[in-house]
């Protein structure tokens, strides 16, 4: 455990009703309180400046609980979506994070992490323990669980602080992949921010009238089945608690795994345009339109025959680059593998007792829950004396279910008919009420922030935004509102530092540069904030950049300068103003540090005249400002930089921190 230094920290719990509770710290502080009629109690205990280890004892009703190895130092909350959740040892399938040698050998007895479980029921929070950052706990850290590992971004943040401050650091990690800012904000605040929307408490009803809502959903499911021949199925939990549910998931497809199943009506897997990589990939996007929600996410079955003559020894089925997101893999009708996690390599044993001399059947049920999906590379069947690679041209497939409103919809359409009817289905399907969803408005505030609200913290770090690209125009207000909401609930104006989302190749219909700019503008609308700019960190084809060290350390720079008095440059250049001239624009920046520099050619700038049409522009640094011009634009009035989903930052300060993308036009 780590407690915030030089504070009155909250300690709380349960005992019998109306009973005295004594809380004592071995550093010399103690307090006595009394439980209420429900047995709940809460007390405030004064802490000294950093140190430890100490003991914390709680005595009530002849029961004495002692917490040993308690450190006192700086406590930070880490929150957001998958890039904050991303575990330090999440490296299967060739992905993961950089700086492996640095974190695998890390041994920091005075850095601790506490992970809030990804659990909407609230059942698992009482079983969580603080993790000490050491090789043993890092080795145990793995993806696809319930937020049980060590956040890579938070790790590098904590290590940087510890190196500079030499005091204990505690991280409370409350993060959940794929989640929107609305889920992390209280109902009360959302109703203030969104007065023109349907009342949040009415629209999102996780807490009230649940039996009636379940009954309503059942009637809607029956109606959709009658009208469209579609069966709806709840998607199991995407974590280790749901692994058995995935294996037992009944999608009217039990026969598909069997050797005897007749798949003559299924088509062979032929990508739209066959590149060298696609020949050896079952990526959904290689065949399906990624912008069509009905066909691009959901369940596809793959089946292929393989000839084996020598059946005297076991084999293994290997997919080194993994499957996105979940698979149940069968060999001759026997389940040999069941894995959750797009980043995990698949290596499944095929026992010799299920082999058949001659033709054998591989059947793989793949469920993509969102974003890119499918089988990410070569499928091999091998043992020490025999290796066979099954080309994807040998696989037959069936699109079996799509995802809509957080459910699986099992259909009987051919792929051609599904594509033809996808717009009609989206328009005419009767919607059920979404229950138990991690993106329900306010749900993560209630389940993952509210339970830790009394805990004393120094501040918060945040890495989120990818899930809100679709409503970038609302994000600045929602994000600033969430920060205010948390501060109001904690009762003080704590520092809040966040990572700007990294450039990435989103779809043509998404505008992540607008979301990045909303994050930039939030700096101006919300006090005591700072932004770690990641324009040099992004990866074109991976929304989860491997480089988490720069993210964590840049967040730490903000804290070191603003909260711990270090005389350093903590941010990359931020747009300040521009001046228009007849043939060029001159841009000035904040956070220039020792001066502006470029890595290679200074690219990514565009300018526009009154007509609002932007053209690529040449740029150069003159007198510590950037001068931008284009032969196609006279009398320019607006300028922008990095104004697309994917770009590589070229403008930095001499401290090595990149400039944020921006647009001067409103």
Image (spheres, rainbow, N blue to C red):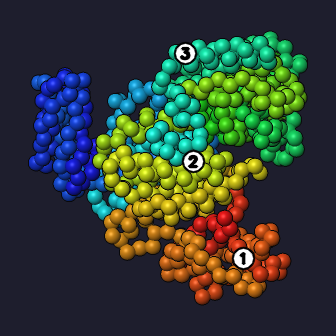
Tell me the distance, in whole angstroms, between the alpha carbons under discs 3 and 2.
43 Å
In the displayed structure, 340 sits above or below 503; it is: above
State the SS at label 3.
helix
Front one among 157 and 478: 478
Any part of residue 576 in sight:
yes
Residue 213 in the image: state x and y as whole percent: 56, 19
State the SS at label 1.
loop
Residue 98 in the image: state x and y as whole percent: 55, 55
Front one among 179 and 336: 179
Q: Which residue is at a point 71% across and 60% down the rendered structure image?
A: 644
According to the picture, the residue beneath numbered tag 3 turns out to be 212
Question: Do tag 3 and tag 2 residues touch (Cβ < 8 Å)?
Answer: no
Q: In the rendered image, which quarter contains the C terminus? A: bottom right
Q: Which residue is at a point 56% across and 62% down the rendered structure image?
A: 520
Q: Nearer the viewer, mark 3 or mark 2?
A: 3
According to the picture, the residue beneath numbered tag 1 turns out to be 637
According to the picture, the residue beneath numbered tag 2 turns out to be 96
């Amino acid at each position: 455990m780590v407690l915030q230094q030089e504070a009155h920290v909250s300690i709380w719990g349960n005992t019998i009703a109306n009973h005295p509770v004594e809380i004592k710290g071995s550093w010399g502080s103690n307090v006595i309180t009394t439980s209420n009629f429900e047995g709940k109690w809460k007390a405030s205990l004064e802490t000294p400046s950093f140190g430890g280890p100490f003991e914390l004892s709680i005595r009530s009703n002849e029961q004495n609980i002692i917490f040993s190895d308690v450190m006192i130092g700086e406590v930070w909350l880490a929150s957001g979506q998958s890039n904050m959740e991303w575990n330090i040892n999440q490296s299967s399938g060739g992905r993961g994070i950089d700086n492996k040698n640095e974190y695998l050998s890390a041994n920091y007895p005075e850095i601790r992490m506490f992970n809030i479980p990804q659990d909407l029921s609230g059942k698992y929070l009482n079983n969580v323990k603080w993790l000490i950052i050491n090789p043993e706990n890092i080795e145990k850290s793995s993806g696809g669980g319930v937020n049980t590992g060590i956040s890579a971004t938070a790790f590098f943040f904590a290590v940087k602080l510890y190196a500079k401050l030499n005091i204990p650091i505690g991280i409370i990690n409350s993060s959940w992949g794929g989640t929107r800012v609305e889920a992390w904000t209280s109902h009360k605040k959302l109703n203030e921010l969104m007065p023109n929307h349907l009342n949040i408490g009415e629209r999102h009803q996780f807490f009230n009238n649940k039996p009636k809502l379940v009954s309503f959903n059942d009637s809607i499911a029956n109606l959709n089945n009658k009208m469209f021949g579609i069966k709806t199925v709840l998607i199991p939990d995407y974590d280790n608690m749901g692994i058995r549910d995935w294996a037992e998931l009944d999608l009217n497809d039990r026969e598909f795994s069997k050797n005897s199943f007749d798949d003559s009506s299924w088509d062979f897997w032929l990508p739209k345009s066959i590149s060298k990589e696609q020949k050896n990939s079952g990526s959904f996007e290689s065949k399906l339109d990624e912008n069509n929600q009905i066909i691009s996410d959901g369940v596809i079955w793959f089946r292929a025959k393989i000839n084996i003559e020598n059946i005297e020894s076991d084999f293994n089925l290997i997919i080194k680059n993994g499957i996105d997101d979940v698979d149940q893999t069968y060999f001759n009708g026997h389940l040999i593998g069941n894995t959750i996690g797009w980043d995990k390599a698949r290596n499944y044993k095929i026992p010799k007792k299920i082999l058949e001399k001659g033709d054998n059947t591989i059947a793989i049920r793949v469920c993509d829950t969102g974003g890119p999906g499918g089988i990410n590379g070569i499928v091999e069947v091998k043992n020490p004396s025999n290796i066979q690679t099954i080309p994807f041209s040998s696989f037959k497939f069936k699109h079996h279910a799509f995802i809509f409103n957080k459910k699986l919809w099992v259909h009987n359409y051919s792929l051609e008919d599904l594509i033809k009817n996808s717009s009609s289905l989206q328009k005419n399907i009767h919607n059920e009420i979404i229950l138990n969803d991690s993106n329900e408005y306010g749900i993560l505030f209630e389940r993952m922030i509210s339970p830790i609200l009394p805990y004393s913290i120094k501040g918060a770090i945040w890495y989120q935004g990818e899930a809100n690209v679709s409503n970038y125009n609302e994000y600045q207000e929602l994000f600033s509102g969430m920060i205010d909401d948390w501060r109001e609930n904690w009762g003080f104006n704590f520092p809040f530092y966040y990572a700007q989302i990294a450039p990435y190749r989103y779809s043509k219909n998404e505008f992540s540069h607008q979301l990045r700019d909303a994050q930039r503008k939030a700096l101006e609308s919300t006090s005591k904030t700072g932004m770690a700019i990641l324009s040099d960190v992004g990866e074109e084809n991976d929304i989860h950049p491997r480089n988490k060290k720069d993210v964590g350390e840049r967040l730490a720079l903000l804290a070191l300068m603003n909260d711990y008095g270090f005389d350093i440059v903590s941010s990359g250049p931020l747009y300040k103003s521009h001046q228009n001239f007849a043939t060029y624009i001159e841009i000035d920046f904040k956070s220039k540090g020792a001066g502006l520099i470029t890595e290679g050619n200074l690219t990514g700038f565009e300018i526009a005249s009154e007509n609002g049409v932007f053209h690529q522009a040449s740029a150069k640094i003159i007198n510590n400002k950037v001068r931008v011009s284009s032969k196609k634009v006279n009398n320019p009035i607006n300028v922008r930089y990095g104004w697309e989903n994917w770009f590589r930052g070229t403008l930095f300060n001499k401290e090595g921190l990149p400039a944020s993308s921006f647009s001067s036009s409103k």
